[in-house]
Amino acid sequence: MNAPYPWLESSWQRLLASRSRPAQALLLAGPRGVGKGGLALAWAQTLLCEAPLTDGSACGNCPACHWFEAGTHPDFQLVTLQEKTTKEGDTRMATAIEVDQAREAVDFVRLSTYRAGCRVVLVNPADTLNVASANALLKVLEEPPLMTVFVLVSDQPRRLLPTIRSRCTRLDIGLPPVELAAQWLARQGVDDAVNLLALAGGSPLDAQRWVGSGELEERRGVLEGLARPDQLDPVTLGERWKAVSPQTWHKVVYKWLDDLLAVKLQGEVRFNRDFSDVLGRLGKRADLAGLLALAKMQAAEGRTLAHPLNRSLQLQAWLIQYRHVFD
Ligand SMILES: [Zn+2]
């Protein structure tokens, strides 16, 4: 079994080297979209495999591997965010791992194993454990039963309780080298991999997810407005942008402002390389104080994203301020 992604090769080898004495609590930490979840699953399968290959990795053929791949291995427990039904009857993804789920994991590790091998609990994303669930889990993390391995995955490890963090052996996964990630994206049939990768902040899996998600078209719609501050009409554009999801709008605008500031201050574009020329021209013209004020506002808006009171009005006000930056 190979590393799930080519840029994870050295992390994967480090894990394999520890197979005979694996960390009982492993924390895989690093930015989102770099394959930590895939690595955690591959590691779990490897620990459970009953006929490992010479390098120690999972064979993919034994009963344990078959069960694992079918999601039915009795000695594997995944603790993750679950879908919930709201009072209105909508299904929504929970924002936290609930204490019941943590208690279930605790019960699970206290049972004897079914296959007399080891037992793996995977917690992903571990930073969504709430205080109660983290404390419940802590009890078994402090003194894990024999042959039990916990794998925690997080892109915000600082949000974990310090007591949990201190119990874990940490393996940091960084952003992959651009060339390697771009080659991989190209092999997945992604055009314009280098630009897309820059846009995704270097995260290859985010870049891949964007293709075909409609988000790229939305982005283009927003950027085309931003690229022409002299011609934009706040009312028309505010109405049009109303259809864009607030999250996408926020992300796109945030990166655009960041790029304008980067051009102004350092003379280079970080994210929107496909708009380098426009950004180069606008960045030079922009008023620094106005730009900083907008960027600050944008950061503050990130905290209230879910509740736009009057979306088009809000967008219009924003656009008027944006236009002034280039007066
Ligand atoms: Zn196997």
Image (spheres, grey):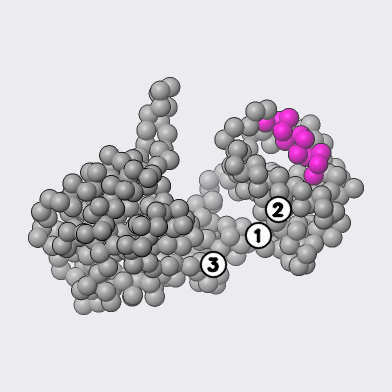
Residue that badge 1 annotates: 271
Q: Report the Cα–Cα distance between label 2 and label 1.
A: 8 Å
Magenta segment, principal secondary structure? helix
The disc, 1 or 3, on the residue closer to the chain's N-terminal end is: 3
Q: Report the Cα–Cα distance between label 1 and label 3.
A: 15 Å
* Image x and y of residue 199, in percent: 61, 58
Residue that badge 3 annotates: 182
Residue at the (25%, 77%) spot, across then down: 55
* Image x and y of residue 18, in percent: 27, 74
Judged from the image, the secondary structure of the residue bearing numbered disc 2 is helix
* Image x and y of residue 302, in percent: 61, 44
In the image, 46 versus 1, the foreground residue is 46
- Say if disc 2 is inside 8 Å of ligand 1: no
**Does residue 191 sit above or below 228 in this rendering?**
below
Hey, what amino acid is under mark 1? Phe
314 left or right, relative to 19? right
